[in-house]
Image (cartoon, coloured by chain):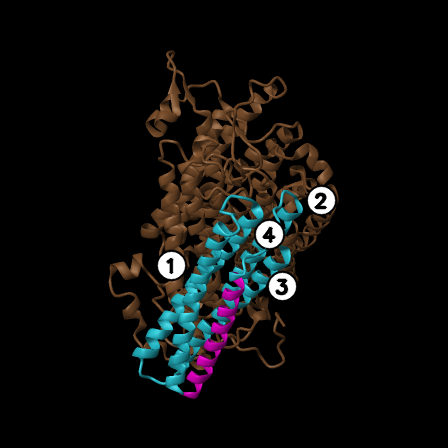
Chain colours: A brown, B cyan
C-alpha cells in the first residue's frame, strides 16, 4: 500500500510541474552533451553545480582530516609533554628530535607551524570552502529552481582556484624550513620579514600565494551565488518564498564579496614589505642584534585590515550553517520554521553588524580605549539577532513531531553549541574583561565551540540531510547516531575545561605548560582534553567510513522526496542530470515551510494555493 | 556590479590605511608629479570615447564605432605607459624610490594595483576590438550586453582613478 501512495504523490508532482511549470526550451539545445560528454568534463573539469558541490565537499573533507590530524599532534605535545613522540618520526621526520635515551620531542618551531596550519586550514579550506562552497553550489540552483549557476564556467574556475590554493598550501607543509608558523592571523613582523622565523621565509611566501588564490576563488564563487539568486529564480519564487538556506547563502556571499578584498589589500601591503623594501607594517626592528632598514611602519594597520575580513569571516562560516540548520530543523520537526521573517532580518542584521565590530579582536593591541567602547557596544548588540535565531530554532522544535535522525540530531547539537559558545562571547566582547581573558584558552574555547564545532555540526546536519540528493543513497543512521553522540559529548569534553584554564590565565599557543609553576597543576586537565580530542577524531573517522561506504553501498533512495520536504530540490529525479529537471522547471506557488498545514504532513512549494489560503512567507 | 563593489572595498581599504598611517606621523610630504595629471586626462578621455563607441554601436554606425574603439584602446594603453612614466618620475625627479617613506610607497602601491585593474580592462577592450573586426552580426542583444559590461567596468576604473588622483593630490 505504502508504495502505491508514494507513486501517486510522484505523479501528482510531475503533473503539477507539467501544468504550472515554466518551459525554457532547455532540453532542445542539448547542453547536456556539451557539458558532460566524457569522464573529464563530467567528473573533473565539470561545470555542473552538483558535481562541483561534491568536489568542494570531498576536498573539504581531505583538508579537515589533515587539519584535524595536526591538532592531534599538538594536543599530544600539550597533554603528554614528557612522553616520547619518537613513533611519529616516520610521519614528521626531522621535526622530531630523538635524544640518546630514545626520547622523541617535537620541535617547538614545528609546534607553531602545526597550530598555524590547523587554523588556516580549518577556517579557510574547510569551513569556508568546504561548507559554504559545497552547499551554496548544491542548493542554490536546486532550491531556487535554476538549471545551473549563472556562470557555470566561473563556478568551475572557483573550485579550481580553491584546489590550487590547496596544492600550494600542501606543498608548503613539506618545505625544509617548514610551513608558515606565525599564527593563522599572519601578523607582521613575523609575516613581513622573511628572516623573522624559520617559517617566515618560503613558508610564508607560499602561504600568502595560496590565500590570494583562495580569495579569488571566494570572489568568483560569491559573484556567481549572488547573480544566480537574484536573476535565475524560477517563476513564483519571490524573495520571501526563498528557503532560509538561500537567504543565508546570499548574505554570506555579499559579506564575502565586501570583506575578502580588504584582506587582499592587507596581503598586498605585506608583499610590498617582504619583497620591495617598503615599511607599511614595519617599524624600527632589531633581529639578532642587527638593526633593519625599516622605519615608521605600523603593525596595527595590518590588524585593522586583517580583522576587517577576519570578523565577517566568522559569519561567512556560521551563516550557511545557520541556514542549513533552519531547514533541517523545520523538515525533521514537521513544523514550519518559527519566525521566518525574523530569521531573515536577524541574518541581515548580523551581516551588517559584522562589519563594525572588528576591533574587538584588538582591545589589547593598543587601540584607543574610547574607540573600544564603540566596538564593545556593537559587539554586544550582535547578541540580539543571534538570540532571536536561537529562540526561533527552539520554538520550531517545541511541540513538533520531532524525528531524531542523524541530520536533526546534529541540527539540535548546533543550537546547543551556538548557545554555549555565544554566551562566552558576551564575556569576551567586553574590553574590560578582555584584559584578563585575551589570548588565553578562554578565547580558544569560545571560538572553537561557537564557530568551529557549531559550524561543523551545521555541515554534518547538511551532509546527512542532503546525502540522498547528492548520491541517491542514504547514509547509515546507526553509525550517524554514534558519530553524533561521540562528537557532541567529546567536543564539550575538549572545550568545556578550556574555559577554566582560560579564566586561570593559561595563555594560548604555548609549547608546554609544565615548566611554569603557575600552570603546572593543570597537567591532568590537559591530559583529559587530549584524550577527548583523540576520541572525537576517531569519531570523525566513523563519518568518513560511513560517507564513502554509503556512496557505493548505502541504502538506495527509492522515492524522490525521502524526508517529505517541501522545497524544490526534492522534485528533481533521484539522479538528476545536467539541467536538474528533465522537463519544465517547476513554478513556485507558496513559501517553503508548509508543514502540518490543513492536516497534511507537508505541502510542496509547487502546489498552488487554495482559494483564500494564506501564503506563509508574505 | 558585484565585482565593482568588491574592488571598491579593496581601494577603500587602501585609502583608509593611507589615512590611518598618515595620522601616525613620520610622513614625508611631497607633491604628486605633474605627469599623473596627464594620465588622468587620458583615462577620462578614453571613457568618453568608449561611451561614444557604445552609442555608435547601438545605432549601427560601424565605422565610427570601430574608430572610437581603437581610440579607446590606444588611450588605455597610453594611460598605463604614462603611469609607468609617473613611477619613473617619482624615482628620478623626486628622488623617492620604493621603500623611502610610507607616503610615497602608498602612491606606488595604489597606482600599481589600479594599473593592474586597468590592464584587465585593456584586455577586455582587446576582446571587444577582435569582436568588432571579426564578427559580422549587427548589434545583437548578446553583443550589446558584452560591450555594455566592458563599458561599465571601464567607467568604473576611470572613476576609481579620478577618486584616487584627487585623494592623493589633496593628501600631499
Q: CA distance from mark 1 to mark 2?
A: 41 Å
Would you say B139 lies left or right of A280 here?
A: left
Given this view, does label 1 or label 4 mark the residue nearer the observer? 4
Q: CA distance from mark 1 to mark 4?
A: 43 Å
Circles 1 and 4 on the same chain: no
In the rendered structure, the residue with mark 2 lies on which chain? A
Q: CA distance from mark 3 to mark 1?
A: 34 Å
View extreme (front): residue: B93
Q: Which residues are magenta?
A: B36-60
Residue A372, labelled with which disc? 2
View extreme (top): residue: A101
Residue at left offset 38%, top offset 75%: B70
In the rendered structure, the residue with mark 1 lies on which chain? A
In the rendered structure, the residue with mark 4 lies on which chain? B
Residue A157, labelled with which disc? 1
Closest to the observer, A311 or A187: A187
Q: Identify the residue under disc 4.
A: B30
Membership of A158 in magenta stretch: no
Circles 1 and 2 on the same chain: yes
Relative image position of residue B66 (x, y in whole percent): 37, 80
Would you say A92 lies left or right of B101 here?
A: left
Amino acid at each position: 500500500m505504502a508504495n502505491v501512495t508514494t507513486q501517486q504523490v510522484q505523479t501528482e508532482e510531475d503533473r503539477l510541474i507539467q501544468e504550472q511549470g515554466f518551459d525554457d526550451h532547455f532540453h532542445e539545445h542539448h547542453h547536456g552533451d556539451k557539458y558532460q560528454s566524457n569522464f573529464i568534463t563530467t567528473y573533473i573539469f565539470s561545470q555542473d553545480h552538483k558535481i562541483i558541490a561534491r568536489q568542494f565537499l570531498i576536498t573539504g573533507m581531505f583538508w579537515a582530516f589533515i587539519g584535524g590530524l595536526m591538532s592531534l599532534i599538538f594536543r599530544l605535545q600539550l597533554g603528554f609533554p614528557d612522553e616520547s613522540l619518537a613513533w611519529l618520526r616516520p610521519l614528521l621526520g626531522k621535526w622530531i628530535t630523538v635524544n640518546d635515551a630514545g626520547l622523541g620531542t617535537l620541535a617547538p618551531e614545528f609546534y607553531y607551524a602545526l597550530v598555524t596550519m590547523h587554523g588556516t586550514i580549518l577556517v579557510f579550506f574547510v569551513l569556508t570552502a568546504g561548507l559554504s562552497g559545497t552547499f551554496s553550489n548544491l542548493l542554490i540552483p536546486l532550491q531556487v529552481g535554476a538549471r545551473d549557476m549563472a556562470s557555470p564556467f566561473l563556478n568551475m574556475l572557483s573550485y579550481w582556484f580553491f584546489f590550487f590554493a590547496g596544492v600550494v598550501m600542501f606543498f608548503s607543509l613539506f618545505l625544509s624550513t617548514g610551513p608558515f608558523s606565525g599564527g593563522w592571523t599572519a601578523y607582521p613582523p613575523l609575516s613581513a620579514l622573511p628572516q623573522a622565523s624559520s617559517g617566515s621565509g618560503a613558508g610564508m611566501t607560499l602561504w600568502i600565494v595560496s590565500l590570494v588564490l583562495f580569495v579569488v576563488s571566494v570572489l568568483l564563487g560569491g559573484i556567481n551565488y549572488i547573480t544566480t539568486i537574484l536573476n535565475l529564480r524560477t517563476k513564483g519564487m519571490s524573495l520571501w518564498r526563498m528557503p532560509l538556506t538561500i537567504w543565508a547563502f546570499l548574505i554570506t556571499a555579499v559579506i564575502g564579496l565586501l570583506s575578502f578584498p580588504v584582506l587582499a589589500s592587507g596581503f598586498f601591503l605585506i608583499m610590498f614589505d617582504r619583497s620591495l623594501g617598503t615599511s607599511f607594517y614595519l617599524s624600527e626592528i632589531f633581529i639578532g642584534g642587527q638593526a633593519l632598514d625599516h622605519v615608521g611602519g605600523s603593525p596595527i594597520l595590518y590588524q585593522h585590515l586583517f580583522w576587517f575580513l577576519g570578523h565577517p569571516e566568522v559569519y561567512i562560516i556560521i551563516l550557511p550553517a545557520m541556514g542549513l540548520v533552519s531547514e533541517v530543523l523545520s523538515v525533521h520537526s514537521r513544523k514550519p520554521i518559527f519566525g521566518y521573517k525574523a530569521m531573515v532580518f536577524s541574518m541581515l542584521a548580523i551581516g551588517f553588524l559584522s562589519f563594525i565590530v572588528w576591533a574587538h579582536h584588538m582591545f589589547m593591541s593598543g587601540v584607543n580605549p574610547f574607540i573600544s567602547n564603540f566596538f564593545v557596544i556593537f559587539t554586544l548588540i550582535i547578541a540580539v539577532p543571534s538570540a532571536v535565531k536561537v529562540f526561533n530554532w527552539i520554538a520550531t522544535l517545541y511541540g513538533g513531531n520531532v524525528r531524531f535522525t542523524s541530520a536533526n540530531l546534529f541540527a539540535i547539537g548546533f543550537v546547543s553549541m551556538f548557545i554555549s559558545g555565544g554566551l562566552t562571547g558576551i564575556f569576551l566582547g567586553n574590553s574590560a574583561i578582555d584584559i584578563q581573558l585575551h589570548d588565553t584558552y578562554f578565547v580558544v574555547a569560545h571560538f572553537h565551540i561557537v564557530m568551529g564545532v557549531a559550524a561543523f555540526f551545521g555541515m554534518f546536519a547538511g551532509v546527512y540531510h542532503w546525502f540522498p540528493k547528492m548520491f541517491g543513497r542514504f547514509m547509515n543512521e546507526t553509525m550517524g547516531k554514534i558519530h553524533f553522540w561521540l562528537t557532541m559529548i567529546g567536543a564539550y569534553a575538549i572545550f568545556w575545561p578550556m574555559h577554566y584554564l582560560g579564566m586561570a590565565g593559561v595563555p594560548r599557543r604555548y609549547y608546554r605548560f609544565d615548566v611554569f609553576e603557575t600552570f603546572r597543576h593543570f597537567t591532568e586537565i590537559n591530559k583529559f582534553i587530549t584524550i577527548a580530542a583523540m576520541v572525537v577524531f576517531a569519531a570523525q573517522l566513523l563519518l568518513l567510513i560511513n560517507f564513502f561506504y554509503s556512496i557505493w553501498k548505502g541504502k538506495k533512495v527509492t522515492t524522490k522526496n525521502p524526508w517529505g520536504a517541501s522545497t524544490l530540490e526534492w522534485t528533481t529525479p533521484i539522479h538528476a542530470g545536467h539541467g536538474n529537471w528533465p522537463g519544465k522547471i517547476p513554478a513556485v506557488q507558496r513559501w517553503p515551510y508548509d508543514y502540518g498545514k490543513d492536516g497534511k504532513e507537508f505541502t510542496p512549494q509547487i502546489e498552488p494555493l487554495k482559494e483564500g489560503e494564506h501564503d506563509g512567507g508574505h | 556590479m558585484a565585482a565593482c563593489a568588491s574592488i571598491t572595498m579593496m581601494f577603500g581599504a587602501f585609502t583608509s590605511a593611507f589615512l590611518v598611517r598618515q595620522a601616525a606621523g613620520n610622513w614625508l610630504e611631497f607633491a604628486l608629479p605633474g605627469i599623473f595629471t596627464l594620465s588622468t586626462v587620458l583615462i577620462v578621455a578614453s571613457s568618453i570615447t568608449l561611451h561614444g563607441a557604445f552609442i555608435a554601436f547601438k545605432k549601427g554606425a560601424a565605422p565610427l564605432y570601430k574608430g572610437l574603439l581603437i581610440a579607446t584602446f590606444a588611450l588605455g594603453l597610453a594611460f598605463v605607459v604614462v603611469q609607468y612614466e609617473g613611477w619613473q618620475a617619482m624615482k628620478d625627479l623626486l628622488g623617492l624610490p620604493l621603500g623611502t617613506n610610507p607616503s610615497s610607497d602608498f602612491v606606488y602601491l595604489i597606482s600599481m594595483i589600479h594599473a593592474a585593474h586597468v590592464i584587465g580592462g585593456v584586455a577586455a577592450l582587446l576582446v571587444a576590438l577582435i569582436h568588432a573586426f571579426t564578427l559580422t552580426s549587427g548589434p545583437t542583444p548578446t553583443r550589446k550586453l558584452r560591450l555594455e559590461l566592458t563599458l561599465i567596468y571601464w567607467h568604473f576604473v576611470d572613476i576609481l582613478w579620478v577618486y584616487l588622483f584627487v585623494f592623493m593630490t589633496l593628501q600631499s
